[in-house]
Image (cartoon, grey):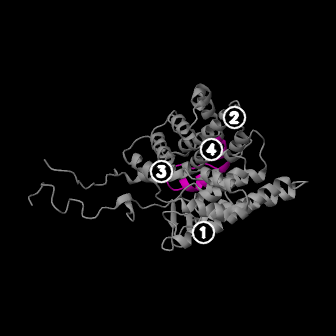
Amino acid sequence: MAKGVTGSTLDRPNLEKVNSGLDGVVVAETVVSEVDGKIGRLIIKGVDAETLGFTSTFEETCSLLWQGLLPDSLSLPEIKQAFYLGRCEAFELAKENSHLFNRSEPMEVLRTTTSLLSGGTEKTIAAYIKIAAAVGYFAATWSRVQKGLDLMAPDANFSQAGDLLRMLTDKVPSANEIAALDTYLTTVSDHGMNASTFTARVVASTESDNVSCVVAAIGALKGPLHGGAPGPVLEMLNEIGTPEKAESWLVDELDHGKRIMGMGHRIYQVRDPRAAIFEKAIGLLEEQARLNSSDNTGANNNSERLLLARAVEKTAERLLAERHPEKPLKANVEFYTAVLLDTLKIPHQSFSSMFAAGRVGGWLAHIAEQRALGRLIRPASKYIGSNV
C-alpha cells in the first residue's frame, strides 16, 4: 500500500468476534485493584481487602489509592482537615440548593448535587478530596432532608465516616460504629473495571473535568444491575423474618422464577470476599454492643439479624446449587452490605448513595490513571444493519 494511505487490514479492528459486555476484554493496565474471581480475593493497592478494611480509615484508604498517581502529597492530619473543608464547601452548596434534596430518588439527587461542584482536570489531592468529601456529604444530606431534619454543618472533630454517621443518624456515633463504616467505605472503594469505574475512565479519556467523570460514574451506579441490590436484600430478610421460614420463602421465590437478591456475581465463582468482611464487621458490632449494653437489647437485635442473614445465605446457596449446578451462585457484596448498613441505622434508601460515597475514592484513582495514559477510549462496533 502506498505511503500515507490508511485503511489497510492491519489498521482495521478484527470485527469477527463480538465481545458483548466486553467479557474477557482487557481495556487497561491498573495498579489500583485486582479482583481474582476464582479464589475470591480482592487486592486494593497491594493490600488484601480484609486487612485494609479493618485497619484503615477512609481518609487513609484514599491516600493509599491516590499514592503514586498524583504529584503531591499531604500528611494524614492534613488530609483529614481537607476532607472537613470539602464537607464545608458541600454544606454551602447544599444551603444554596436545598430544594434539590426534596426529590425522592437519592441517586438522582446525588448525581445532580455532585454536578454543582466546580473543578477542572487537576491531578491534586486537594481537588480529589473536595469531590470525595462532597459525595458523602450530599448522600447523607438527602437522608436528613427526607426525614424532615435540617441541614447539618460539618464538624472538624470527626472523620469523614464519623461525620456522615452523625448526619445520617442525628446522634454522636461511637468509635465502634465509625470503625464499621470505615470498614465499609474502604472495602467498597474499588473493585476492578466495574461498570461505573469504566464509565469514569471513558469520560476521563476525553480530557473532560473530574466532576463530569464522577457524575457519569454515579449515573452508571444508579442502574439496578450495578448498584441497586442492597435495599431489596433487606426487604427479603424482613419478609422472611426468622431462620425457620427461610427455606419455604426461598423455594416459593424460585418456583415463581424470581431472583434471590444478594446471591451471585458476574466475576466471582466463589463467595464474594467483601461479604465475608461485612459479615465479620457485623459480628464485631454485635460483640461490642453486648459488652456495652446493660440489658443486651441492642446486642440481641444485632445477633438475631445476623443469624437470620446467615441462615438465608446458607439455604439460598444450597437451593441455587440444586437448581443451577452449572453456575456457582453465592453471596455477593450486597448481601451483607444490607445487614451492616442497617445495623448502623442507615436508611435502606441511602444504601446505593453510601456505596458511591466509598467508591468515589477508587473512581478518582482510575481517573488519574487514565489521564496519565492520555489515550481516548474508542472501541469499534460491528454494523449489522441493512445496506441500501
Question: Which residue appears at 28% of the width and 64% of the height?
Answer: 17
Disc 4 crowd rating (10 Å Cα; few below 14, some 14-19, many 20+) is many
**Please, what is the three-letter code of the amino acid marked with disc 4?**
Ser
Residue span colored magenta: 60-83
Q: Residue beneath label 1, please?
A: 317
Q: Secondary structure at mark 2?
A: loop
Q: Residue beneath label 4, please?
A: 350
Mark 3 / mark 1, whichever is N-terminal: 3
User: Is label 2 in contact with label 3 (beta carbons under 8 Å)?
Assistant: no
Q: Residue furthest left?
A: 2
Q: Is residue 95 visible?
A: yes
- Cα separation, mark 2 vs mark 3, equals 29 Å
Q: Residue beneath label 3, please?
A: 196
Q: Quadrant of the N terminus?
A: bottom left
Residue 149 location (% of width, % of height): 71, 31
Is 269 left, or right, of 142 in this rendering? left
Mark 1 / mark 2, whichever is N-terminal: 2
Disc 3 crowd rating (10 Å Cα; few below 14, some 14-19, many 20+) is many
Mark 2 / mark 3, whichever is N-terminal: 2
Q: Residue beneath label 2, please?
A: 147
- Cα separation, mark 2 vs mark 4, equals 12 Å
**Please, what is the three-letter code of the amino acid marked with disc 1?**
Glu
Question: Which one is in front, 265 or 319?
Answer: 319
